[in-house]
Amino acid sequence: MTTTKKAAPASERRAHLVRLAADLFAEKGFRATTVREIADAAGILSGSLYHHFDSKESIGDEILREFLDDVLGGYRAAVAGTDDPRIAIERMVRSSTAALSRHRAALTMLQNDWAYFSAQKRFAYLRTAMKEIEQTWIDQLERGKRSGQFRADLDARLIYRLLRDILWIPTSWKQSRGQSWSTDEIVTGLLHLLFVGISAH
Amino acid sequence: MTTTKKAAPASERRAHLVRLAADLFAEKGFRATTVREIADAAGILSGSLYHHFDSKESIGDEILREFLDDVLGGYRAAVAGTDDPRIAIERMVRSSTAALSRHRAALTMLQNDWAYFSAQKRFAYLRTAMKEIEQTWIDQLERGKRSGQFRADLDARLIYRLLRDILWIPTSWKQSRGQSWSTDEIVTGLLHLLFVGISAH
DNA sequence: CGTACTTGCCCAATCGCTTGCTCGGTTCCG
DNA sequence: CGGAACCGAGCAAGCGATTGGGCAAGTACG
């Protein structure tokens, strides 16, 4: 009665399964991961997953929504407290990095399976969220140009595109082999690159 | 007699089929693309592909090899003519951008299906080529540090990793909807970002 | 000229397997 | 008892791969 067939019970077990699935998605992408692999990771049979979810896509949907909520929340907080676009951008960079490390699966899914998701109306919210993200960045970049803090010849849209994709690069390194850099080192390196480039002086 | 069974005839038709397959790989990745889709794009049945190729992997192999040859050739030419690491790096950036736009499929394949390819001994040459690419970049960055042209506190390996991934970002924009930037605009924006950052002065 | 053979290309059919998913039944626990 | 969790078996669809054969154009040879 409480749960018909399509509903989402939102139990603790369910949340755990989502996390297990997310780990697999983060490494292989959405489509390349099978429901049997997810079930194996949970120690159950694949059919048993459908007691918790009505489809594989629902798992993906949940992961993507949580990620976008997290990112957008962070951006709104980043621009709320200050009038200085440089401070706002630095906050957005740090906020993005933190959010991405919290949702590695969502990133891999958006990278590998964007064509798959964006073709479905169920995932139309992806485009909406992306547009808000883009607008937030461009607003700050334009403000920085007007205030004279950023180069006047700067193409805000182009820089945004570069930044957006640059920011989620280090996330895919996390699971990489061998010694790595700490999140701090990476963010520092990025911010340095962003504001002053690689040249001396 | 001439062609036993595993050979590659290297005909014109074959090259055309590789191009069709590459277009699909560029959009969906290697594993996510089926041989039936490739055949459909060519207007033939899937089985007919096996007259030209002995396996789906052979198509991928051909695409990847051509790409790596192109990139490495460009790098060798870029560092050959000059002693100035900044000039060498600028040449490498331009060479990379050009090569990537010529081999969008290879990029998507390396991004989406790296785990798949690198696990096979048939594709062992991928790691070899990647190492030569990395060494070329690091050499130039270190030379720039020693000559005082680049910041002394610069982590060459970190910067290389960032650059490598940054460089192939704009490639995935090419097929995007609506107005875009020209290759020149993108390269200029990147080089500017790389050498002087976004700050005014 | 005409016949025989080769070559390049493709179809039709099928194999063994994996995919996401279904569903009736069973176990466990409050 | 009742509900949540899971099992076990299986389905239709699709997957990559392979085989055997057919068709047309070319080549060789008498």
Image: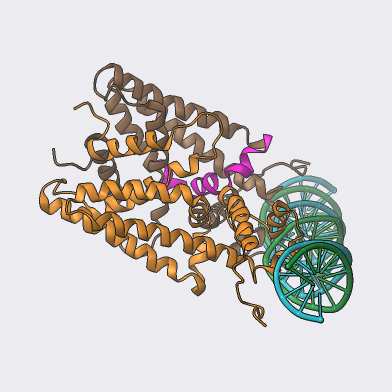
Chain colours: A orange, B brown, C green, D cyan
Question: What residue is drawn where x is 66% and y is 62%?
Answer: B36
Q: Residue A183: image x %, image y %?
A: 42, 38
Frontmost residue, D26 versus A43: A43
Q: Is residue B193 visible?
A: yes
Instruction: Indicate left or right for B19 with A49 as reference.
Output: left
For the C terminus of chain B, the image quarter is top left
Front position in the image: A24 or B165? A24
Q: Position of residue C1 (x, y in %)?
A: 76, 62
User: Is residue B5 shown left or right of residue B181?
Assistant: right
In the rendered image, the vertical position of residue A76 relative to residue B81, given as above or below: below
Q: Position of residue B115 (x, y in %)?
A: 61, 42
Q: Quadrant of residue B135?
A: top left
Query: Residue A113 in the image: x percent, y percent?
Result: 53, 58
**Residue B180 visible in rendering:** no
Q: Is most of the magenta stretch helix, strand or loop?
A: helix
Looking at the rendering, which quadrant does residue A175 occupy? top right
What quarter of the picture does the N terminus of chain B occupy?
top right
The magenta span reads: B99-121
Query: Which residue is rendered at x = 21% and y = 47% of the image?
Result: A86
Closest to the observer, B74 or D3: D3
Q: Quadrant of residue B198?
A: top left
- Count all numbered tags in the image, as a single digit: 0
Q: Does the segment drawn in magenta span residue B74? A: no
Nearer to the camera, B38 or A172: A172
Question: Which residue lies most toward the top here?
Answer: B146
What residue lies at 26% left-to-right and 49% top-to-bottom? A89
- The answer to whether residue B100 is magenta is yes
